[in-house]
Image: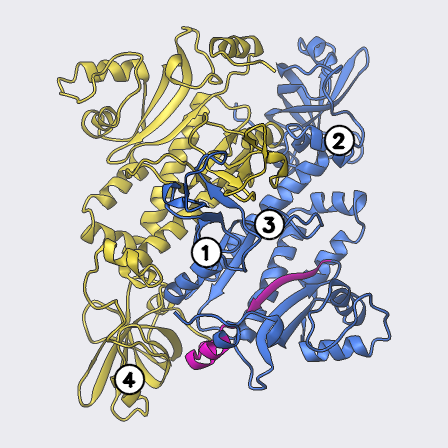
Chain colours: A blue, B yellow
Amino acid sequence: MQRSKIKDIFNASQAGGDVLVQGWVKTRRSSKSVTFIQITDGSTLQDLQIVVDEANPGHDAASGLTTGCSVSVEGTLVESPGQGQKYEVQAKSLEVLGGSDPETYPLQKKRHSPEFLREIAHLRPRTNTFGAMARVRNSMAYAIHSFYQERGFQFIQTPIITASDAEGAGSMFQVTTLDMANPPKNGGQVDHDEDFFGKPAFLTVSGQLEAEIFALALSDVYTFGPTFRAENSNTSRHLAEFWMVEPEVAFCQLDGLAELAEDFLKHIAGHVLENCAEDMAFFNKWYDDSTIATLEGIANAQFERIAYTEAVDLLLSSGEKFEFPVAWGTDLQSEHERYLTEKKIQKPVIVTDYPKDIKAFYMRMNDDDQTVRAMDVLVPRIGEIIGGSQREERRDVLEGRMSEAGMSHD
Amino acid sequence: MQRSKIKDIFNASQAGGDVLVQGWVKTRRSSKSVTFIQITDGSTLQDLQIVVDEANPGHDAASGLTTGCSVSVEGTLVESPGQGQKYEVQAKSLEVLGGSDPETYPLQKKRHSPEFLREIAHLRPRTNTFGAMARVRNSMAYAIHSFYQERGFQFIQTPIITASDAEGAGSMFQVTTLDMANPPKNGGQVDHDEDFFGKPAFLTVSGQLEAEIFALALSDVYTFGPTFRAENSNTSRHLAEFWMVEPEVAFCQLDGLAELAEDFLKHIAGHVLENCAEDMAFFNKWYDDSTIATLEGIANAQFERIAYTEAVDLLLSSGEKFEFPVAWGTDLQSEHERYLTEKKIQKPVIVTDYPKDIKAFYMRMNDDDQTVRAMDVLVPRIGEIIGGSQREERRDVLEGRMSEAGMSHD
């Protein structure tokens, strides 16, 4: 018989008929005449109840099952008399595929701390929390691809190992095949002629440079892959390794980019709310009861768009006491961003036209000669979630900006 | 006006109506009364012809256009009187967005060698070859995701930076933030306590170990991301960095795995033939006139399945002269694989049940105690394209195999 996933079983239009289900035991309780087993197969947050009657030859095995055992069950799909679940399976046969010693198996029917789960990384995907994270992450990743594919963007894979630094030196991991204890040297310096690529190599911090090249041939492209930062900064906003999305769009000005960013975030938030409702309800219940409201706010709001100068005015006239002072020309801090999006405007905000001196040299200069066509997308409870810019296409202006920044034109 | 991609223009159901197109000039030819421009925007292999009449104020600018210039054109979509293309655009206005100096712009209307294009990597995506590669690669990547998503697999992102070696030491890149010229030392060895992760770290060669862990909680998972090999081997089958797909399936035996592999390859080949017909026709014409036939052979054939022992018998009785001798117990060489799939069986072949001594210790032992439940998928003109195995689930057998291999059980 073809295996059914538990998710598909709960989506069945009616009970009746035989199914084969395979998964891992969450809990088991036995009476003399019947054993109830809750099993999960990771396809959904919901466990499926298996009922094994005393008369069933598998009852002895079933009554000895403990958390973590894996089983294969054939049985009849019946409506569940209990509350909270639609169907259960009346077992016809049960096979124990893998045992689990209750004395040593570390997951039990209780909440485990993230710190404890970190020590049993090989088992934590079996917990509700990590299962839900994996399913939501999967759903978002596919939604990211679908969003761009539907708009005719080409997904490109930019190099991970690179010799170029997109964001300024000092935060990159070096990659080498040399013996670090005794590297070949030349005049006191490590001789990278003998290294794998014949020169120093690093892990990429951004696919932007390669994506720009492809956008100047294919019009609309995006990357979605791992990037790396060697900053030794342990905050919730820093990771050494993380997956990032980078679209690059030719023939597009800042307004078009802001529209793309808004459409993108709404698509992702809406997709997760629709396709991961159970998992999101789990997070909303156990972790943060504003989770769903935050996503709904992104999916349903029309994003506000304000210029940086206007944002600074709002902050200065707010009467709020900020830790970092607000002044035109300085970057917005998290507390400023969160005031704007959570308190003042109370929905996602796209801040545009930042002072040129706090943004990259390649962003398009406005006619005021003071601000550039950059944008940051701020959303409630998260803060900055997307940054972007229209590039300077006027060669003379770009070369002027490079001279100001002390960069070579060659 | 909303920009139209050239691909969408050629897919329009009828001529008539105004369009805005933006792209890069491939060629331009002018007469006194009219200028014809071929432009590309990378959305399709086909160029779009723009016709600019003498009476149009943009005609002067148009008549000076050279290869590589970028333009924005508004005009009317009309049926093309010329052969080979359906529509062209009668320009109403034309704006030159970016110039291109014909003295220095290196791409011209001729074939450029791959070696030459390597030196202008920032421009090669504009060539037909690299554009087609990018579009086919994009299409295949999305087909890979769609295939697994439709089957309820979860996409997981496994770590790139890792301390574990899935394939045996010696072929990994090391990752460090230490000063390689003067690394801190302890007893003559590099002191990785001071390195970013507090111990030696490397680039992953496979996400298999992490994917197995997730499969044992979520049932069906796959990875699709970059992996790395530091083998200094310059062949068409070795890359330092490449994207790999790794599915891991719980509750699945070798037959199910072989079926998944066959379905997967057919899906990808069929998808590319259907969705990238123009680009594949380009490769078939200019690079290898068996390209499409090879993909059709994958998409339409029922894959043959034979055991390794049978494969060896076929090779021994073939009468072929091989460079490497054939003997039961040795691995199949490329020439052997290609004989089987191209000459003898003439379609894709899944070879199963390899001798245990040439496969990994964790593959499930057959009852003959000599072969294991491994498979390699061989396809004509490519050879081995997928390798996989059913894992040994019997703990005593697995520990026996580990002892044989001199591995610690802890």
- Taking the view exactly as shown, the residue that stands out farthest to the top is B368
Residue A257, quarter of the rendered image: bottom right
The residue at the point 55 percent across, 74 percent down is A254
Q: Decide which of tag 3 and tag 1 comes sooner along the chain.
A: 3
Of the two numbered discs 3 and 1 in the rendering, the one whose residue sits closer to the viewer: 1
User: How crowded is the residue under tag 3: few (<14 C-alpha within 10 Å), some, or many (20+)?
Assistant: many
The residue at the point 56 percent across, 14 percent down is B408
Q: Is residue A400 magenta?
A: yes
Residue to which mark 3 is pinned: A140
Of the two numbered discs 2 and 4 in the rendering, the one whose residue sits closer to the viewer: 2
Give me the chain letter of mark 1.
A
Magenta residues (range): A382-401
Disc sitting over residue A116 in the figure: 2
Give how far across and how far down residue A208 sits, in percent: 48, 60
Give me the chain letter of mark 4.
B
Disc sitting over residue A395 in the figure: none
Amino acid type shown at disc 3:
Met
Instruction: Please tell me if label 2 and label 4 are on a single chain.
Output: no
Residue to which mark 4 is pinned: B62
Amino acid type shown at disc 2:
Phe
Give me the chain letter of mark 2.
A
Q: Secondary structure at mark 3?
A: helix
Amino acid type shown at disc 4:
Ala
